[in-house]
Structure formats: C-alpha cells, structure tokens
Amino acid sequence: MSTLWSKGTQATDLVEDFTVGNDRILDMRLAKYDVEGSKAHIRMLESIGLLEAEELATLSAALDEILVEIEEGSFVLEDDVEDIHSQVELLLTRRLGDLGKKIHSGRSRNDQVLVDVKLFLKDEVLKIREELLTLFGTLQGLSEKHKDVLLPGYTHGQVAMPSSFGLWFGAYAEALANDMYMLRGAYNVTDQNPLGSAAGYGSSFPLDRQMTTDLLGFASLDHNVVAAQLSRGKAERAVASAMGAVALTLNKFAADCCMYMSPNYGFIRFPDELTTGSSIMPHKKNPDVWEIMRGNCNRIMSVENEISMLCSNMPHGYHREFQLLKDILFPALELMHKCLMMADYMLQHIIVKENILDAPIYDYLFTVEEVNRRTLEGMPFRDAYRTVGIEVNEGRFRYMGASGKTNGQLTPADLNHTSIGSLGNLCTERIRAKMEKAAEF
C-alpha cells in the first residue's frame, strides 16, 4: 500500500487491515473537502513564497480537474493507496511530476483530516438545519390545521387533562426550535480552522493561517496549534450532541405515533401503503416506520457517549483512535437525515380523528376544568378539589362547558385555556420567530 509516511518498510497485511479498517471507504465522503483544503493551502503557500505564481496556477487547475472527477463520480481511491490525502497527492504527482509533491509543504495529515472533517461537518449541519426547518414548517401547519380538535392528555399513562392536536403538533415544533439552538452551537464549535497546526505543534514555515481561514470560509481559527489538535473529537462530539437532541425529539414523537395508532387509542392513522401487515393476522396495520425511527433515534442518541468514551484517556496530540470517529459519526449522520426526511414524509399523510372525547373513558378528563371553574366562582381551591373528587368517586361527575356542550362536542374555545402556550393560545407566530432566530447561522 502506498503511504505518505513510508520509510522503506511495509506493514503486514494483517496490521494494515486492522489499523485501516473501514477508513478508506469513509474517506470518500471527504474527497471534495480535501481538494478544497488543498486549494486554499497552495494559495497561501504562493503568498509566502513557497510556490511560484505559475506553479500555483498549474496546481489549481489540476485540483479543479480532480474536483470535477469527484463530482462526476469517476474519482476512486485506489486499492494500494492508504487514504484520500495520499490519493490526491498521488494524482497530482502523476500528472505534474515533482510539482505535485510541493503541495504538502507546511501540512500534516493531522491538520488535513481536521480541515476535511470540519468542512464536511459544517455542510452536514447545514443540511440538518434545512431538514429541521422543513419538518418544523410541517408541524406548525398541522398545529394550525387541527388546533380546534381536542385530544386527551395523559400523565403516568392515565387520562389527565384536555389537550389538542394543535398543542401536540405545536409542542414538537417548538422542541425542534430548541434543538436548533443545539445545532447552532455545534456549528460554532466546528466553524474554526485548524489548518496550519500541522502535526499539532505548528510549522517553521511562515504560514498565513488567517488567509486559509478566510479562503475556506471559517468564521475563526483554532489559534493555538495544540488546541487545534485537542479539537479532534470535540467537533464530532458537539455535532453528535446536537443530533442526539434532535433524535430525542423524534424518538418521543415516534413513540407517541406508535401509541396513538394503536386501536386502544385510535387518535391518528396513516394510509395503508405507509403501514405494514402481519403474516397471519389480516387486520394488522403496524407502525413500522415509527418503530424503526424510534430505534434509529436511540442509536443516534448513543453516538455522543461512544465518541466521549473513544476520546477519553488519551494525552494531548494525535492518536490513531481518532480515525474511528468517522466510523461512529458518519453512519449516524446518514440515519439523522433519513429520520428527518421520513418524519416529514409521514406527517404529510397523517389523518387525525375528531370527536375522540365522545368515548366514556374521557368523562373525567375535565375534572380540573370544573375545579378551576368553582374556584373562579369563589370556592377555595382545596374545597373545590375535594367536592369534585367526591362526585367522581360516587359516579356523579359530569362536565358541561359554558355553551352547554359536553366531551366530544367541546372545542378549545369552550375551555378557559388562554394563557401563553396553552391549547387556546398556541403562540404559533412566537414559536416561528424563535426558530428563525435559532436558525441564524
């Protein structure tokens, strides 16, 4: 295998297979970012006199050719080449001779991979941001569409108080806005340029690190070269943490959907083509999409811990374990994209049930409403609570709204829920403004 670090001896196939693992396959996702980093690096090298202007032009044109090959899908990581950095340099050397070898001046594979990963993660976070905004819009649309349809709320799995589909959909929309703040934080952690830190202790070349920071579109740079190496694993962990927050939101929503689709609840349903059946029970309509999403989101939530465990117990500087970060995080990013896409797709087809509260099981859903009504009329709260409780125990409790409606006929307008964020005051516009602010990165 061709290695940049070879000094004339070769590792055995067994050692190479164990140490390289799946890294070469994962490296293909970094190919275009490696070229982008190299293009910025050589422009900086020319500015400090390590390349002639003609050499810069030749190298830039060759890198542009490689970038086109990557975008067209014809670029390959050859079997005997160790990684993406080696492949790009090898192609340049084949095509340009000794000029191709100059591209590595002032760099180490350590800061190369740091740059590649950070550029890659920045793009991935921005993709997740757009997916979050799409799902957020869908949830808010459903919240407004079904804001007048009441839904029973549960605590401890027991019938508790009145809710609504507007409140339910809107809750998850706002949860995504909070998750967006986490995502923005991860982006800020990632948006710092490590290029020029070399192997973690800088370079005796007069590298212009601010120039490469500007060329690569980073907001700032990892100033201390040792700190740049310490960032290895931290950017990945920050992104994993943000994904974990999103995954927790989706996980809970998926669990709700599995429960609400059950005939014991029957609050929502989906077209037959979005559910699956049983091999022996012809009546079954299984929530497989939501179950798989629930499971995959659990897997995504585990990634932050796996990264934390991988990166602990190591002194500062580079260690080969860092290579395994890609093996942990990259598949999780794919799962995150798929889960967000599928959640939005399913919600485009959700069907909510109306008049749910007609069922006798919800006769006591409005006990708190009655306690509050009597309290507002002057009865001490504890007395109101006790008398309503006695009526429930004796089977005499009945709730009737001010308009004379009962249970299934009631709407949020019949209930005195007008405080901020309650089912009669969903604050849809305020939550939208919150999301817009969170997404400003």
Image (cartoon, helix red, strand yellow):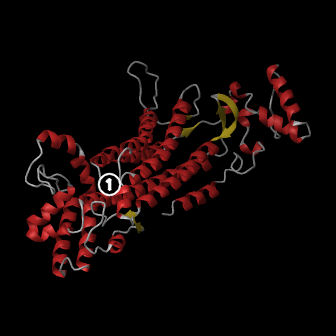
* Nearer the observer, 71 or 333: 333
Q: Amino acid at mark 1?
A: Gly
Q: Nearer the viewer, residue 308 or 216?
A: 308
The percent coordinates of residue 369 (x first, y second) are 79, 37
| Number of marks in the rendered image | 1
Left-right relation of 25 to 335: left
Neighbours of disc 1 within 10 Å: few (<14), some (14-19), many (20+)? some
Q: Is residue 222 left or right of residue 85?
A: right
Frontmost residue, 259 versus 18: 18
Query: Which residue position holds label 1?
Result: 317
Instruction: Residue at 71%, 51% (x, y): give it.
Output: 420
Q: Is residue 277 visible?
A: yes
Q: Is residue 349 visible?
A: no
Direction right: furthest residue: 378
Snapshot quadrant of residue 34: bottom left
Query: In the image, residue 254 lies at what x, y percent?
Result: 50, 37
x, y percent for residue 136: 53, 52
Residue drawn where x is 46% and y is 48% of the image: 241
The residue drawn where x is 21% and y is 56% is: 84
| Percent of width and height locating residue 225 | 35, 64
Left or right position of 116 against 379? left
> Looking at the image, is 86 positioned above or below residue 23?
below
Using the rendered view, name the quadrant where residue 15 is placed: top left
SS assignment at label 1: loop
The residue drawn where x is 40% and y is 53% is: 234
